[in-house]
Each structure stands twice: as structure tokens, then as C-alpha cells.
């Protein structure tokens, strides 16, 4: 089987030299889970700032010019029972999903996606469901939607 290779294209990554970019993600045998030491972000010296195993992913080096919003993803606010699932979903958004834009997703868009993940993680843990349980059952998905409307509306 041929390995698939994905490179992050979010934020300002495309304009950086390769030593400052996150690791390339290589899918082997349909395994879309990265190694825990996979580098999510690097500092100006090329040293890892955030790895997949970390509960805070720092995307500040990849913000677009003028973007002063938050650029750190805090998984600590997600219940531990589903934190791995949410982390994996965010990873797939960063490295595998195609945005339809040459520059990929902006860091601010990624941060907005994380805002949607928190209520899902809290609902999932409260109902003792995995994230897969929510997406694979129409009733669970509807209940998530209803609980989110109650929290926001």
C-alpha cells in the first residue's frame, strides 16, 4: 500500500521555510493517528513548541499578519474521557482536511472549530458516549444539537 503524506497548510505556514513548519503526517496502513511526539508547531528556532501528546497546542507562530486573536488550543477544558477523540478531530482539521483554499484554514478559523468541540466533548462525557457514538447515531446527534441550543439560546 502507498503511504499518504499530508502537510499542514493552515495560517501562514506556506510562507515559512521547512525548518519552522510542523511535521509532515504520513498515513501508514490507513492509520490516521499520529505518533504522540508528532510536532504540531515549532518556534522561530525550529524547536518543537507543541506535540500531539500536549494538552495545549500553540499555533501562534502560524497566525496571519494582523491576527491578534487567541492561537492556543487548550484541551484541558475537555473531559479526559473524550480528550483523545477531540484532539484527533482537531488534528485531522489541521493536517488532513482540505479547505478549498490554497492557503488552508486560518488560525482564527481553527480556533472557532475548537469552540464547537468543547460543548461536544462535555455532552459526550456527560452522556458517557464516545465522539464516534454521537456521529454514528441520529438520536445522539439530535440530543447534542438540542443541548447546545439550550446552552446558547
Image (cartoon, rainbow, N blue to C red):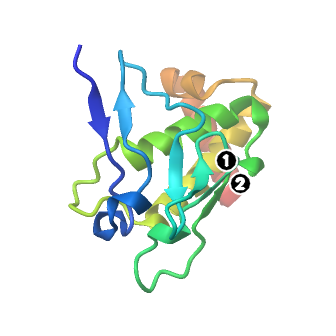
Residue 139 at x, y percent in the picture: 57, 25
Query: How many labels, in total?
Result: 2
Direction from residue 12 to residue 2 in the image, left or right = left
What residue does disc 1 label? Answer: 119
Dot 1 alpha-carbon crowd within 10 angstroms: few under 14, some 14 to 19, many 20 or more: some
- Quadrant in which the C terminus is drawn: bottom right
Rendered position, 78 above or below 27: below
Direction from residue 76 to residue 108 in the image, left or right = left
Front-most of 73 and 135? 73
Compute the Cα span from label 2 to label 1: 9 Å
Residue 64 at x, y percent in the picture: 40, 76
* Residue at 54%, 61% in the rendered image: 111
What element does badge 2 sit on? Answer: helix
- Quadrant in which the N terminus is drawn: top left
What residue does disc 2 label? Answer: 151
| Viewer-nearest of discs 2 and 1 | 1
Rendered position, 75 above or below 108: above
Direction from residue 122 to residue 28 in the image, left or right = left
Rendered position, 79 above or below 140: below
Q: Which comes sooner in the sequence, label 2 or label 1?
A: 1
CB-based contact (under 8 Å), mark 2 and mark 1: yes
Residue 35 at x, y percent in the picture: 54, 31
Residue 54 at x, y percent in the picture: 68, 46
* Residue at 36%, 27% in the rendered image: 27
* Residue at 75%, 29% in the rendered image: 81
Dot 2 alpha-carbon crowd within 10 angstroms: few under 14, some 14 to 19, many 20 or more: few
Amino acid at each position: 500500500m502507498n503511504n499518504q503524506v499530508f502537510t499542514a497548510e493552515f495560517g501562514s505556514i506556506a510562507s515559512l521555510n521547512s525548518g519552522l513548519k510542523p511535521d509532515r503526517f504520513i498515513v501508514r496502513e490507513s492509520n490516521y493517528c499520529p505518533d504522540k511526539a508528532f510536532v504540531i508547531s515549532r518556534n522561530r528556532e525550529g524547536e518543537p513548541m507543541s506535540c500531539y501528546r500536549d494538552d495545549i497546542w500553540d499555533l501562534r507562530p502560524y497566525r496571519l499578519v494582523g491576527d491578534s486573536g487567541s492561537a492556543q488550543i487548550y484541551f484541558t477544558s475537555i473531559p479526559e474521557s473524550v480528550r483523545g477523540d477531540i484532539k484527533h478531530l482537531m488534528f485531522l482539521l489541521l493536517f488532513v482536511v482540505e479547505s478549498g483554499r490554497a492557503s488552508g484554514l486560518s488560525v482564527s478559523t481553527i480556533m472557532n472549530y475548537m469552540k464547537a468541540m468543547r460543548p461536544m466533548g462535555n455532552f459526550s462525557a456527560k452522556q458517557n458516549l464516545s465522539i464516534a457514538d454521537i456521529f454514528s447515531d441520529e438520536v445522539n446527534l439530535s440530543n447534542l444539537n438540542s443541548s447546545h441550543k439550550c446552552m446558547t439560546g
